[in-house]
Image: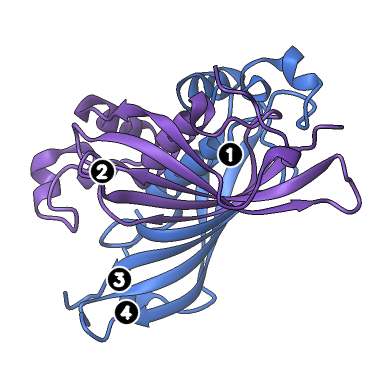
Chain colours: A blue, B purple
Amino acid sequence: MTELLYLDDLAVGMQFQSPTFAVTEADIKRFASEFDQQPFHLDDAAAKTTFFGGLAASGWHTAAITMRLLTSGGLPLAGGIIGMSVELAWVKPVRPGDVLHVISTVQEVRRSKSKPQQGVATVLSETVDTSGDTVQRLVSKLLVTARDA
Amino acid sequence: MTELLYLDDLAVGMQFQSPTFAVTEADIKRFASEFDQQPFHLDDAAAKTTFFGGLAASGWHTAAITMRLLTSGGLPLAGGIIGMSVELAWVKPVRPGDVLHVISTVQEVRRSKSKPQQGVATVLSETVDTSGDTVQRLVSKLLVTARDA
């Protein structure tokens, strides 16, 4: 079991690795049917003639899977993972069969002056596929609880 | 039926309004069970003592609902809605019963010099709740097809 970390425990450069998640064709189509009904996320034949050149997961699906991996051990924060804002880039399509994991790196830690029992951590989370390529780059501003809160 | 727009048709300041989507407690818990298993997204009683003060949708759920609204009429782009990168801020919790819609505003339009048959549009999409308050602010860099592609 991973020890949960408070603001006080975080330092720039700390890294965390998540478990893995295998993305299936059924997952891709189910997510897209609910949230992103575009041909390149729903139908392999139709996707062939598009920008993606074949079925690819919705970027929002990749983001959601990334959150799943962060909340299931990938980023062990004591107060939970509470994002205030993020920057997100999709750099490579996610395909059926890809096995993803997330590497997170602490980039900045700032205790709040007005509320010293909490602070903001900036964390880079890179979602990596089976080939070792980054598929998504996420930089999150997270609200983190201090040990003495 | 809305006319689909190409890069050539977009101009700074153009606005689009999406249909609406009603968020249920069951939706919030189902999304969280799959992607964001934290108490404030799963259990109203447990959520009471947290930062959120009650059950709230995962920010990634709000983002996914926003994409659903954009792809179902909220942003009628001819080649589809293909995000390369986004900036995303969650400014107010989304609660069970909230009815959301999205107002999108074109902020910048740039034709590619190397591939003039396409370009990048920067679009601000504000997701608004029943009270008229913005719950999420999304700025997307979208790959947009030109009319002569």
CB atoms of marks 1 and 4 within 8 Å: no
Q: Quadrant of the N terminus of chain B?
A: top right
Q: Tell me, yes or no, if residue A149 can be seen here.
A: yes
Q: Three-letter amino acid code at disc 1?
A: Gly
Label 1 belongs to which residue?
Answer: A59
Disc 1: CA contacts within 10 A as few (<14), some (14-19) or many (>=20): many
Q: CA distance from mark 1 to mark 2?
A: 21 Å
- What residue do we see at 19% from left, 31% from top? B97
Label 3: few (<14), some (14–19) or many (≥20) C-alpha neighbours in 10 Å? many
Question: Which mark's residue is nearer the viewer, 1 or 2?
Answer: 2
Between B28 and B104, the one lying in front of the other is B104
Q: Considering the numbered disc 2 on the image, is that residue within a helix, a strand or a loop?
A: loop
Residue identified by numbered label 3:
A6
Q: Which residue is mark 4?
A: A8
**Amino acid beneath label 3:** Tyr
Callout 4 and callout 2 share a chain:
no
Q: Tell me the element at label 3.
A: loop
Q: Are marks 3 and 1 in contact (CB under 8 Å)?
A: no
